[in-house]
């Protein structure tokens, strides 16, 4: 079994061979670790690009910028507007493909402007276990995934980040707000704002890893399994119910399965097994 040091050395070699890279930076665990290592190996030949859109909470953008500033990493900010693309807004199972195609296209142009051939994302080895159409866009456009190429899992990345004293080493996983909406339900700006407010409220109550899934009039809340009892306590239930009613949800449910990555793919995965 390969050690972390072997995998990290492989990552160093990959980045050195690339000679320069434009990184799709979000401020999450994976892209922050990749950005920090790339800066160390490539210096100014490592460019980090942060995309802002309606599908990404403003608080996450602020936090990403604060993290980059702490680490001395320069960030190029761009705006994307996925909702103008009807193929994305229609919310088919290929939604992420259209989003990533737009994003990676912009990163490739930035790379050309700076004489940098390679664009990289923060995908890791564990991402192969989930349905990720964005990976198809990456493959078609020649986008690299250095963390995955180096054989790094999510736990590996957290451990290395901890060793490097990166503030993101234990940051909860995050995905764009569109992932809270079932396939086939159109993505509307108003729904994204409601979801952002709902999840922000849950985090203010102290829940670190949380998802609020939108099912029309129903809000389905996912928290970590060990937090379910607390979420169901009378005091928390009352606060959540009042807030979510303000956000125009008629029914508020607590998912007893707890938080799990890609839970909206459950129906899709079930259909594929038939």
Image (cartoon, rainbow, N blue to C red):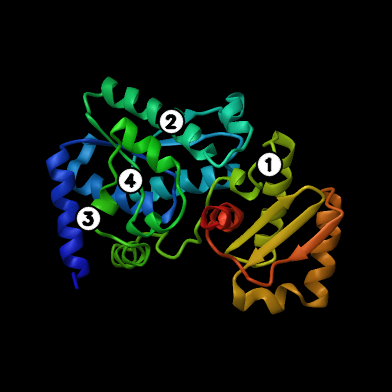
SS at badge 2: helix
What is the number of the mark on residue 150? Answer: 3
Q: Image point 71% across, 57% down: which residue?
A: 201
Q: Image point 84% across, 58% down: which residue?
A: 251
Rounded to the nearest whole Å, what is the CA distance between mark 3 and mark 2? 24 Å
SS at badge 3: loop
The label nearer to you, 1 versus 4, is 1
The label nearer to you, 3 versus 4, is 3
Asked whether the beta carbons under mark 3 and mark 1 sit within 8 Å of each other, the answer is no
Graded by Cα atoms within 10 Å as few (under 14), some (14 to 19) or many (20 or more), the crowding at tag 4 reads few
* Quadrant occupied by the N terminus: bottom left
What is the number of the mark on residue 101? Answer: 2
Q: Does the rendering let one see residue 77?
A: no
Residue 78 coordinates in the image, percent (x, y):
46, 29
* Quadrant occupied by the C terminus: bottom right
Residue beneath disc 1: 192
Rounded to the nearest whole Å, what is the CA distance between mark 3 and mark 4? 24 Å
Indicate left or right for 63 with 251 as reference. left
SS at badge 1: helix
What is the number of the mark on residue 38? Answer: none
Rounded to the nearest whole Å, what is the CA distance between mark 4 and mark 2? 29 Å
- Quarter of the rendering containing residue 207: bottom right
Rounded to the nearest whole Å, what is the CA distance between mark 3 and mark 1? 35 Å
Residue 146 coordinates in the image, percent (x, y):
26, 48
Q: Image point 77% across, 64% down: which residue?
A: 253
| Badge 3 or badge 2: first in the primary sequence | 2
| Badge 4 or badge 2: first in the primary sequence | 4
Q: Does the rendering let one see residue 252?
A: yes
Residue beneath disc 4: 72
Q: Nearer the viewer, residue 74 or 143?
A: 143
Q: Is residue 265 above or below residue 39?
A: below
């Amino acid at each position: 079994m390969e050690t972390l040091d072997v995998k990290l050395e492989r990552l160093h070699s990959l980045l050195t061979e690339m000679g320069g890279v434009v990184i799709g930076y979000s401020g999450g665990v994976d892209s922050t670790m990749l950005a920090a290592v790339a800066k160390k190996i490539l210096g100014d030949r490592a460019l980090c690009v942060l995309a802002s859109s309606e599908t990404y909470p403003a608080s996450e953008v602020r936090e990403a910028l604060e993290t980059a500033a702490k680490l001395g990493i320069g960030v190029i900010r761009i705006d994307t507007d996925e909702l103008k693309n009807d193929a994305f807004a229609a919310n088919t199972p290929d939604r992420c493909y259209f989003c990533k195609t737009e994003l990676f296209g912009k990163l490739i142009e930035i790379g050309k402007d700076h004489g940098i051939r390679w664009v990289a994302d923060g995908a890791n080895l564990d991402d192969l276990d989930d349905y990720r159409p964005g990976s198809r866009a990456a493959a078609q456009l020649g986008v690299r995934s250095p963390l995955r190429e180096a054989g790094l899992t999510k736990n590996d990345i957290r451990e290395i980040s901890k060793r490097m004293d990166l503030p993101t080493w234990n940051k909860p996983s995050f995905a764009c707000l569109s992932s809270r909406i079932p396939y086939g339900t159109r993505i509307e700006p108003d729904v994204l704002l409601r979801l952002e407010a709902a999840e922000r409220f849950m985090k203010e109550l102290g829940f670190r890893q949380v998802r609020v899934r939108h099912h029309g009039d129903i809000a389905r809340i996912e928290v970590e399994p060990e937090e379910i009892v607390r979420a169901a306590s009378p005091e928390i239930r009352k606060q959540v119910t009042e807030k979510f009613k303000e956000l125009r949800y008629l029914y508020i449910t607590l998912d007893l399965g707890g938080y799990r990555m890609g839970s909206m793919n459950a129906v899709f995965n079930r259909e594929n097994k038939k």
